[in-house]
Amino acid sequence: MGRDAFDAGLQLAIIDEHDIARTGLQCWLAADHPQLTASETFSDYAGYLARRSSGLEVDVVVTEIQWGTHAPDIAGLRVLCATAAAVIVYSRIASDEVVLSSLENGAASYVAKADGKAHLLAALRCVADGGAYQSPRMAAALNRSTSGGRINLSEREKQVLAAWFQTESKDDVGRRLRIAPATVRTHLQRVRAKYAAVGRTASTKSALLARAIEDGIIGLSDLDVGSGQEARAVNVLPKQRLSVKIIPMTRPE
């Protein structure tokens, strides 16, 4: 793509599980920026990759990274970035860890949907010229990363953390991952220490679960509903604390 690629015209693919999001982007582009053609849209990575293998050619892919309430699909994004000319993540997720992981796995730019369509347009223009546009959300994440605000959990620590939220005890985690319960405790202690070191203390299991959801390590749909973890997760997420008082009903005299 050359210097005037944006104005000359771009072929886009849009990936988002929500029909209204895909259609909304298509209509906006067709009305205000007809040189940006999004003739095909997809509800998931698999649909795009199947069309790509059958000959679909696009200049830029604009994609969501989270499906339902599962954890963001970083592994799928890595595969997508390996096959697409350029990928812009356009997502409702705005956590630093998800932004940074997306960039590390090949995304050219990351725009939070809350940033607005003007920033998506700026990202398309920049990526068309071979650059990497920094949206407000992306710039904030990069700034916090360089200033020491990132926790940098290892893959094993993430595995232990996710397994702990999906089971009832450290012994269960040990059996699932084939490690000793003492090793599980050590990993969890290190995870808590890393969060504390960047000012994000998580002294309880519920608080640690909230951190893990914020950072895209696990999603609500990945939890075992029967264990009650999903309900506890909703109650500890930031700005979603609820206090319910149950008042017993009495029969009228």
Image (cartoon, helix red, strand yellow):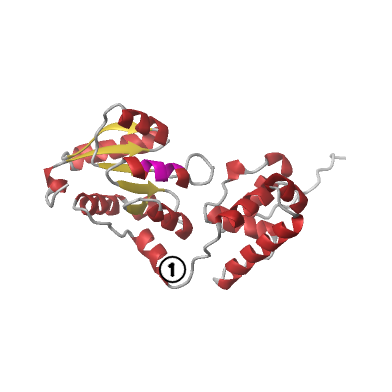
Question: What is the quadrant of the C terminus in the image?
Answer: top right
Horizontal side of residue 115 vs 71, given as left or right: left
Where residue 31 sits in the image (x, y, percent)? 20, 38
Provide the secondary structure element on which disc 1 rests.
helix
User: Closer to the camera, 36 or 186?
Assistant: 186
Percent across and percent down for residue 17 are 42, 35
Residue extending farthest to the right is: 253
- Using a 10 Å C-alpha cutoff, classify the residue at mark 1 as few (fewer than 14 neighbours), some (14 to 19) or many (20 or more): few
Residue at 35% from the left image edge and 53% from the top image edge: 111
The amino acid at mark 1 is: Arg
Residue 220, image x and y in percent? Answer: 59, 45
Q: Is residue 165 visible?
A: yes
Give the residue drawn at x 54%, y 42%: 70
Q: Which residue is mark 1?
A: 144
Residue 164 as seen in the image, left or right of residue 107: right
Decide whether the magenta segment is chiefly helix, strand or loop: helix
Instruction: Say if the magenta span includes residue 153.
Output: no
Tell me which segment is drawn in magenta.
76-80
Q: Is residue 7 depicted above or below 99 in this figure?
A: above
Across and down, in percent, residue 7 comes to: 13, 46
Residue 150 drawn above or below residue 206: below
